[in-house]
Amino acid sequence: MTDSPTSDLRAAARELDDAGLCVVPIKADGTKAPSVRWTPYKATRSTSEEHDTWFSAERPAGIAVVYGSVSGNLELIEFEGLAVREGLLDQVTEIMEASGTRLSEAWAAITNGWVTESPSGGRHFRYRIEGGTVPGNTKLASRLAEPEEYTEEEKQRLRERPNSRILRVLIETRGEGGYGLVEPSGGPVHASGRPYVRLAGGPGTIPTLDAETAEAIRDACQVADKLPQPEAPKTAPRPAPPRLDGTLRPGDDFEARASWADILRGTFRPLHTRGRETYWGWADGVGGVKATTGKDEHDRLFVFATGSEFQSDVPYSKFGAYALMQHGGDHKAAARELARQGYGDRKLAAVGARAPSPSLAPAPPAGPAEDEDAPAAEQPVQEDTAREEGGFDYAGTFGLPDTVRTPYDYRVTAARGVEVLSTSGENWLRVTFAPLVITATFEDPEGDQYVELSWIDRSLGRPRRISRIVSRETAKRGRKLIESLGGAGLPAVEGDARAVEKWLAEFEASNVGRIPSEQLARWLGWQDDGTFVSSPEDGIKVDVPFEEQRGPARAHARKGTLDGWRDTVAQLAGYPVPRVAVAAALAAPLLKPLGLNSFTLDISSRSTKGKTTALQCALSVWADPSEHASAMSNWRTTLYAIEKRLNLVRGIVTVFDETMAVTDDTLIDEVLYQLPMNHGKARSGGAFGNMLPWETILLSSGERPALSFTTSQGAAARILGTTIAPFGEGGGPTAAAAREGVLANHAHAGPEFIRYILSGLAQPNGRELLKEHHRTLVDEFRGSGDMTSRRAPMVAALVLAETLACRTGLLPYEPLAYDVWRGLFTAHNPTDNRPDMALDVLREYVAGHAHELFSATRAALNEKPPYSGWLGVLSTKDGVTEVALLPERVRKILADAGYSLDAVVGSWVDAEYLKTLRSQRPAHLVPRRFDGVRAKCLAFTPKGLSFGDEEEAA
C-alpha cells in the first residue's frame, strides 16, 4: 500500500518531520546540493520554523532526508537505474529469498516499506537499525563502464591517464553523515528534469531491522559487485607450466578436479545458484550470503564476510583455499599432501605428512590402498600421545570422565592453556590463555542444542572454574563467542577466534560419548515435551536467554518446609483476598491443560492493609517472596523488561507490585492489552526478543486499580480486580505473621501441586475430566450479564485450583463458598465499571488544579478568576470541606481522558459520591454561589472527592 504523497514541499516536510526525519532544502539547479549550510543538521534535526522558511511558495526547491542517527538510525540502499535495468534488483531478491526466513522476511519488509523511484529509474529503499550504529555512505556494488558509456569528460581522463578505471556504481548506501533526495522533488532539482516518485508506503511505514540483519542485507548486495579484483600468488597462485613429461602438478590437478562443495564443507554451504554463479552462506545456517564462486571464467572464491580465515574481497583459487583451510596457507605442505592423496601423476612419500581432516579435505581419487595407509616416518602426534598418558587432568579440573582425551595435534596445560601444533610440526601455537573445554552438551524440548563451556580463571589471584552455556551456533562462531563471553573472562582474544572455534569442535568430536549430555530448560514451567520445571533445583539445567531473567529464575528456590508453609497460610483462613491470591498462584499451571489465556488478578485499595503481603503469600507458592530476591517485580520499569520477565514462565505466577510507581500510565495499559495474547510485541527485522511468549497469571497491586490506567472498554473482561483491603481492619498482626512465615518457608507448595496435577493428567481421560470440572464451575459463575459471563472461565480456574489444593490437603482450610467468589468478582465491582476509573481521573485533575477552585479566602483577597475560568468552589460547613465542580468543566476533563460524564454520573449518585436535592431537576445538580453568581454544580461528598486535611488523613 502506498501512502498518498503530496506535491506541496511544506506538507512533505511536515510528513517527514512527523516520522522523526531530518530534512534539508535542495537547490533547484540540477546539482542536487543543499541550498543551506547543512553540516549542523547531521547532528540536529531541522525545525518546523526552518521548514516554513525553506519551503515557502516563493522559494521553489527540492527536499532531502539526512540519514543516520539524526533521523532515528535511518539508512538507505539505492539501486541505480542502471542496476535495475541490468537485473541486479531481481538478482539480489533471489539471493535474499534463498538466504533463509530471516533475510527473506526482512527484504520483503524493506521492498514493501517506503520505496521511491529516482529520476534515472533507480530504487530507494529505507530502514531503521536497532541495536547498532548506521555506517557511513558505502558503495556496495560497481562495475567497469563500457566504452560506449563513457562521457566526454571520462574519455578525456583516459587520454590523460590511460590506466584509469572508469566505474559505474550500481548499489550504494546513504548512512551516517549522508543525505538523499525524496519525493516530491522534481523539475530543475534533477539534471534530467524528471521527478522522484513514491512507489510504496511512506515515512510512516519504514521497517526496523536489528544491526546483524542490516549487515547481512549489505553483504548480500555486495555479491552483485562486478569489479575485477587483482589476484595474489598467496591466494590464487598462477598455474605452473606442465612438467617435461607433460604431467600436471598436484595443485593444478586439484584445481581441475576438485569441487568447491568438498573444499568448503564445514565452513560454507551452498544457498543458491544463478547461472554459473553459486552463493554460499555459513555452514551453520546463520546469516545470509557470505561468499560466491563462479563469477568469472576463473571460478574464484570471493568471501564478503570477516568471520572466517579468508580475506574479504580477495579472489581464491581452489588450491589457494585448500592450502589456507588445511595447511594454514603453506602451499608446499598442501601440494605434498595432495600428491600423497593421488593428485598429479607422481606419488610422493608421506614423510612428515599428517592425515587430512575428513570434514574438509576433498575425497582423494581411487588409488592403491597402501598409499592411503602408509605410516608417516615422523609422527608429531607421538609426543602428544606420550603427554596424554599422564596429561591434563580433565576429571579433577572440570569433573569430566577419566576417558576424556585431548585431540590430535593439541595439548592442554594449566600454565599455558590450549596450544596447537604448527603446520611444520616444529612449535606450539597458543589458542587460549587458560584451559577451555566443553563440559556438557544440552538439548532443549524444542530440539535446539547448547554447550556448556568451562575454563579456569585466575583474575582473583586463585584458580577457579567458570562455566557458561551458549548455543551451538555461538560456539561455532569464534568472534561471536568471544564477544558474548569476553565479559565473563573467556581466556581468548579475537585474533584467535577461528582457532578457538576449531579447538572446541575438535575437542567435542574427539570425545563423543564421553562429554555428558543433559536436558536443558530455557524457561520455568511447562516444557514442550509435557514436563514441568518448577525451579533450577529440579535436576534439569535451567539457562534463560536473557541476563535479566537470571535473578528471578534463581529466586525460584526452596526454603524451609512444606509443613511450615501450611502452618503459615492456615492463618489466612478468614481473609478471602489473600486466599484468592494464593489460589491464583496455584491456578497458573492449569492454564495450559484448560486451554486458557493469561490474565490479571489486581488487588487495589487506598489503604496500606497488606496488599504487598497478599502478593508475597501468593508468590511463596513458587519462589522467594522477599524484597531482596528478584521474583517480585515493580511496575517502575519498561515494556520490554516486563516482557522478558513474563517470558521466564509458562504456568507459574508473575507478580508486579505498586501500580503507582509506574512512570508512564500507558505502560500498564499496554501490558493489560498484551498479556492475554500470550506473547510480546512484534519487533521488525527478526530482532532478538521478537514476540516473546509466556503463559502466566499476573498478580498486580497498588492504590489505583489497574483498570484505571486504561481507557479500553474491553479491559475489564481480561482482569479480575478487587478493592477490598486484603487483611481488613485489625488484620495487621495476621499480615505480619503471614509475611514472616512465607519468608521462612517457600517454593514447596507449587511443585507439590504440580505432582498432583501431572498424576491426574496421566490417568485415562485425565485432561478431559479436569476440563469438565472447569466447565461445571464456569456455568456456576457465568451469571446473567455479559461481563460476568466473560470473566467466568478465569474465576472458575481460581476456584478449581483452590478446590483441588484443599482436597489434597495442600491448603489447610475449606474452600471459599461460591457466594464469596461471586461477591468478589462476578457481582457489581467498582473496578468493573468506568465510574470509579473516571472519578480517579477527576481526583487527579482537581489535585493538580486546586488554584482554579473559588473559595472564601480567594474572595477576601479579591483574586481574579484564572485564565481558564473557575473549575468550581470550595465551601466549609461544620468543619467539612466540600468540593463542587461546574458540570461542563467536568465533562471536558473526562472526555479528554476517554470517559463520558453522562455514562458515569448515575453510578456516582448510587455510590453516594454526589449530593442530591429532590427539589432540583436533575437532583444531582446542586446550586452553589461563588464569585457573585449562582450556578448548578456537581457537589461531591467527602466519600467521592475529599479535600485538604481529610485527604491527608485518608
Image (cartoon, rainbow, N blue to C red):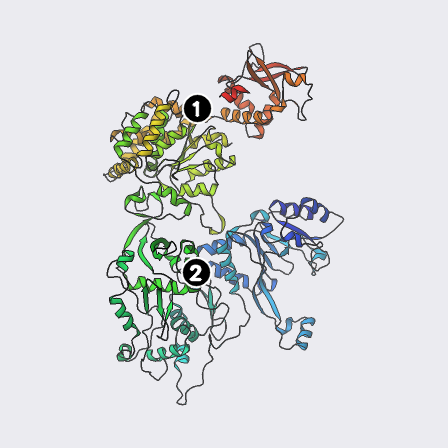
892 left or right of 577? right
Residue 425 vs 435, above or below: the answer is below
In the rendered structure, which amino acid carries the disc numbered 1? Asn
- Identify the secondary structure beneath mark 2: helix
Residue 363, given in percent of the width and then of the height, sits at 34, 73
Q: Nearer the viewer, residue 643 or 719?
A: 643
Query: Mark on residue 107?
Result: none
Residue 786 vs 256, above or below: the answer is above
Residue 241, given in percent of the width and then of the height, sits at 45, 85
- Identify the secondary structure beneath mark 1: loop
Residue 522, given in percent of the width and then of the height, sits at 36, 47
Residue at numbered disc 2:
479
In the rendered structure, which amino acid carries the disc numbered 2? Arg
Q: Residue furthest bottom?
A: 244
Q: Callout 2: 10 Å neighbours few (<14), some, many (20+)?
A: many
Between disc 1 and disc 2, whose residue precedes? 2
Residue 408 vs 9, above or below: the answer is below
Residue at numbered disc 1:
829
How far apart marks 1 and 2 lie (CA) works out to: 58 Å
572 left or right of 721? left
Q: Residue furthest top?
A: 919
Quadrant hosting residue 430: bottom left
Residue 700, given in percent of the width and then of the height, sits at 42, 32
Q: Is residue 778 visible?
A: no
